[in-house]
């Protein structure tokens, strides 16, 4: 079984080491996003051919050598192109740290924690059109420990699970000459978009990039997000975070893009061209995404019966105590059986040094009692 490994960082290097020990498996080369990436270094140390991507978001056909049986994706944010998949006899598979189709997207482990899932899992799936949407080749599951962070869950269970699942699928393909394939049930699909850089399981971002904050508002129509993502990919920008929604028939969204400094002006100009299609486009640049050392980052979750005044009461308390709202997401969930409406808030907050999480928790507890709400507040792990 002749394979090419597309990946990055510690997990990619660990998968490479494991596959090289597997009987009947030959690694024809590795594909990495940068010369100094951990996978690229491990590949060169093993005497393998290393292809470094010109565009860290796309694996082209010429990255895959002739005669390859299978492409394996392990911690890669690059899309494996159709041309690349066509060069491998069995196509490609990747590992996603969730029980697909739940939590499709770049922040699956974080959303597993934020959603309070008692069970997590991992999936090896066929690389195909759409992010994380291909047929399932293998899955496994684990319990989520109480109070566990995303990084702890990844290191304790999901990374070792991915290693085991990938080697199992590769050996099954070698022995059977084909990949297992079970279509995903679209009824249970959920999305796990990027939350913010500091909680994603990646290494520190390079200082050679510029942060562009893009805000778009206009009549909702098909293809808006595709137009935006195409421009980001064209200029090698990383889609770091986003909030996209449809409100009263209008499309509204904010996207944080990290683009190489030398391409920032060109990308900004390309984004502003979207205004010709009827969108209102505002592009701002951020000099720094770091949180001042004097501020303490915490996560807030609130759930309760929907009623007028929840947001007003909450934000009044936060403003009076000097708390900054870094990110706020609200939604109303209606029960299909009882018709009951539940209001949910998820927020990232920055507390001043003079305010402890315990003090804020006590004050919010009064609000929770008065409005019959469930409120959870905890320090956010970087």
Image: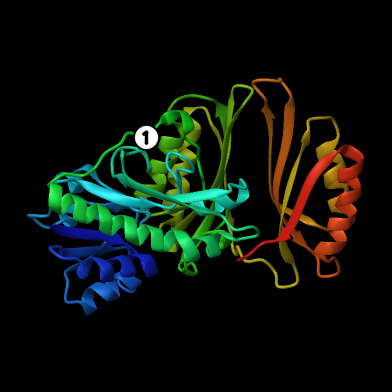
Front residue (pair 155, 144): 144
* Residue 292 appears left or right of 163: right
Residue 216 appears in which quarter of the rendering?
Answer: top right
Secondary structure type for disc 1: loop
* Residue 233 appears left or right of 382: left
Question: How dense is the environment of label 1, judged by Cα within 10 Å: few (below 14), some, or many (20 and up)?
Answer: some
* Residue 120 coordinates in the image, percent (x, y): 50, 50
Residue 301 visible in the shown view = yes
Q: Is residue 120 above or below residue 51?
A: above
Q: Residue at x 59, y 63 (%)?
A: 287
* Residue 328 appears left or right of 315: left
Q: Is residue 140 above or below residue 38?
A: above
Colouring convention used in this rendered image of the protein? rainbow
Front residue (pair 70, 330): 70
Q: Is residue 254 above or below residue 67?
A: above
Front residue (pair 149, 243): 149
* Residue 336 coordinates in the image, percent (x, y): 64, 21
Residue 324 appears in which quarter of the rendering?
Answer: bottom right
Q: Residue at x 14, y 53 (%)?
A: 174
Q: Quadrant of the N terminus?
A: bottom left
* Residue 259 coordinates in the image, percent (x, y): 45, 57
Front residue (pair 137, 359): 137
Residue 54 visible in the shown view = no
Which residue is identified by label 1? 184
């Amino acid at each position: 079984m002749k394979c090419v490994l597309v990946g990055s960082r510690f997990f990619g290097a660990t998968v490479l080491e494991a596959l090289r020990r597997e009987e009947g498996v030959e690694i024809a080369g590795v594909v990495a996003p940068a010369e100094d990436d951990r996978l690229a270094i491990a590949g060169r140390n093993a005497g393998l051919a290393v292809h470094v991507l010109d565009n860290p978001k796309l694996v082209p056909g010429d990255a895959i050598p002739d005669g390859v049986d299978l492409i394996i994706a392990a911690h890669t944010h690059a899309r494996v192109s159709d041309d690349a998949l066509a060069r491998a006899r069995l196509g490609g598979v990747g590992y996603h740290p969730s029980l697909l189709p739940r939590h499709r997207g770049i922040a699956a482990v974080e959303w597993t924690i934020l959603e309070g899932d008692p069970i997590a899992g991992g999936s090896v799936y066929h690389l195909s059109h759409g992010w994380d949407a291909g047929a399932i080749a293998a899955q496994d599951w684990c319990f989520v420990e109480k109070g566990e962070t995303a990084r702890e869950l990844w290191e304790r269970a999901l990374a070792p699970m991915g290693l085991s699942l990938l080697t199992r699928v590769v050996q099954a393909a070698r022995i059977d000459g084909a990949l297992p394939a079970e279509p995903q049930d679209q009824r249970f699909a959920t999305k796990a978009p990027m939350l913010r850089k500091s909680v994603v399981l990646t290494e520190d971002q390079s200082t050679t990039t510029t942060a562009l904050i893009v805000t778009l508002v206009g009549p909702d129509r098909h293809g808006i997000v595709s137009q935006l993502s195409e421009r980001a990919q064209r200029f090698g920008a990383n889609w770091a975070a986003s909030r996209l929604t449809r409100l009263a028939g209008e499309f509204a969204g904010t996207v944080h893009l990290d683009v190489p400094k030398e391409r920032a002006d060109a990308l900004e100009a390309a984004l502003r061209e979207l205004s010709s299609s009827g969108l209102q486009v505002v592009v701002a640049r951020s000099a720094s995404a770091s949180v001042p050392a004097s501020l303490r980052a915490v996560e807030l979750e609130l759930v309760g019966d929907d009623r007028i005044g929840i947001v007003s009461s909450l934000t009044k308390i936060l403003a009076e105590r000097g708390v900054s709202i870094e990110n706020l997401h609200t939604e109303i969930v209606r029960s299909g059986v009882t018709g009951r409406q539940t209001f949910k808030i998820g927020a990232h907050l920055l507390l001043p040094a003079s305010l402890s999480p315990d003090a804020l928790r006590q004050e919010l507890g009064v609000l929770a009692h008065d409005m019959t709400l469930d409120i959870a507040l905890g320090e956010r792990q970087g």
